[in-house]
Image (cartoon, helix red, strand yellow):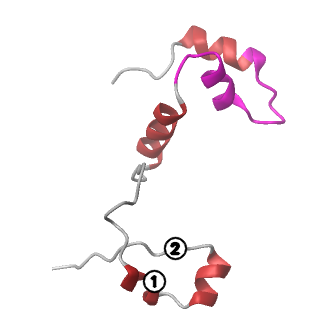
């Protein structure tokens, strides 16, 4: 698998990065070494979380009924689709 950025690019970005602000990704993008989309895709792969750019065609209004509104608000959850198990 190709690297998102080179070791030299990462070293340069880390030299600029303020560890208190945790802005490494913004620096990598501002230096033109990568894009925000590539960073998000890499992070989704690393964390094993699906990457979506759009939920178009995936929203299922009946999914919202699966979680009571109070629970959804408290957990900041938005059910978007239902999957059916065999």
As drawn, the residue found furthest toward the top would be 8
Cα separation, mark 1 vs mark 2, equals 7 Å
Residue 8: give its label.
none
Describe residue 9's horizontal placement relative to residue 13 as left or right.
left
Q: Which residue is mark 2?
A: 78
Say whether disc 1 or disc 2 marks the residue closer to the N-terminus: 1
As drawn, the residue found furthest toward the front would be 56
CB within 8 Å, label 1 to label 2: yes
Residue 70, compared with residue 30, is above or below; it is below
Badge 1 crowding class, 10 Å Cα cut-off, few under 14, some 14 to 19, many 20 or more, is some
Asked if the stretch drawn in magenta spans residue 30, the answer is yes
Badge 2 crowding class, 10 Å Cα cut-off, few under 14, some 14 to 19, many 20 or more, is few
Residue 80 is drawn in which quadrant?
Answer: bottom left
Describe residue 85's horizontal placement relative to residue 47 as left or right.
left
Q: Residue at x 48, y 35 (%)?
A: 37
Q: Which residue is mark 1?
A: 64
Residue 6 location (% of width, % of height): 51, 13
The magenta stretch is 15-34
Q: Quadrant of the N terminus?
A: top left
How many numbered markers are drawn?
2
Q: Residue at x 40, y 60 (%)?
A: 55
Secondary structure type for disc 2: loop
Residue 16 location (% of width, % of height): 77, 17
């Amino acid at each position: 698998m190709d690297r998102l950025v080179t070791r030299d690019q990462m070293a340069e970005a880390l030299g600029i990065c303020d560890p208190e602000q945790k802005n490494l990704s913004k620096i990598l993008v501002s230096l033109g070494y990568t894009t925000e989309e590539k960073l998000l895709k890499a992070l989704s792969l690393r964390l094993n979380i699906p990457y979506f750019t759009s939920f178009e065609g995936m929203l299922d209004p009946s999914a919202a009924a699966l979680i009571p509104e109070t629970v959804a608000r408290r957990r900041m959850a938005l059910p978007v689709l239902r999957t059916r198990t065999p």
